[in-house]
Image (cartoon, helix red, strand yellow):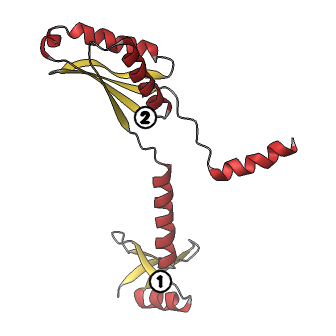
Amino acid sequence: MPEVRLVGPNGEQVGIVRIEDALRLAQDADLDLVEVAGQARPPVCKLMDYGKFKYESAQKARESRRNQQLTVIKEQKLRPKIDKHDYETKRGHVRRFLEGGNKVKVTIMFRGREQSRPELGYRLLQRLAEDIGDIAVVEAAPKQDGRNMTMVLAPTKKPAPRKTAATATTDAPAEAEA
């Protein structure tokens, strides 16, 4: 005679009952009989509304996905013989990416004879790291691989949360009253 350990809809232990009795109890309560732990002896079953259970677990999964932080790596390419103004423009882009909370991979591309002078690229990356040291930390030190030298920068602090339209409208009346 097959038996199961039955758990009630509110988590209370009903005890060990026959499967037929458990199914009858589930029908009387207008609930489903769900096997929770099939490996246990006897198997554990619970009285619950299975549709509601699936819906709530899907909501929890969606909420946890929403709270995950997506890390994006932006890339900025430079040349060793970069002009001062061009360097400042690229540095501005790197700063903007970091302030947005993204990691930045800075790549120096060497061509021709430039490949015999990797120290130029190394100095350029060091200068960039110093210039934006207030908002970034070097995650991967400058490293030569083939014709390129790369360095990865990560933001030191999290980006400020963006104001949405809902928070902007709720802040406006408070400022008008003050």
Real-space Cα separation, disc 1 to disc 2, in angstroms: 47 Å
Q: Quadrant of residue 23?
A: bottom left
Residue 87 to residue 159: above or below: above
Name the residue furthest left. Answer: 112
* x 39%, y 82%: residue: 3
Q: Earlier in the sequence, mark 1 or mark 2?
A: 1
Residue 67 image offset from top left, x and y in percent: 50, 49
Task: Identify the secondary structure beneath mark 2.
Answer: loop
* x 24%, y 7%: residue: 119
Q: For mark 2, what is the residue?
A: 102
Residue 166 to residue 37: above or below: above
Q: Nearer the viewer, residue 64 or 162?
A: 162
Q: Are marks 1 and 2 in contact (CB under 8 Å)?
A: no
Q: Nearer the viewer, residue 75 or 101?
A: 75
Q: Quadrant of the N terminus?
A: bottom left
Residue 53 image offset from top left, x and y in percent: 49, 72
Badge 1 density bin: few <14, some 14–19, many ≥20, Cα 10 Å:
some
Residue depth check, mark 1 versus mark 2: number of the one nearer the observer: 2
Name the residue furthest right. Answer: 177
Residue type for callout 1: Asp
Q: Quadrant of residue 19?
A: bottom left
Badge 2 density bin: few <14, some 14–19, many ≥20, Cα 10 Å:
many
* x 76%, y 47%: residue: 172
Q: Is residue 147 left or right of residue 133?
A: left
Task: Identify the secondary structure beneath mark 1.
Answer: strand
Q: Nearer the viewer, residue 141 or 60?
A: 141
Q: For mark 1, what is the residue?
A: 32
* x 46%, y 66%: residue: 58
Residue 36 to residue 24: above or below: above
Residue 96 image offset from top left, x and y in percent: 47, 29
Residue type for callout 2: Asn
Q: Quadrant of the C terminus?
A: top right
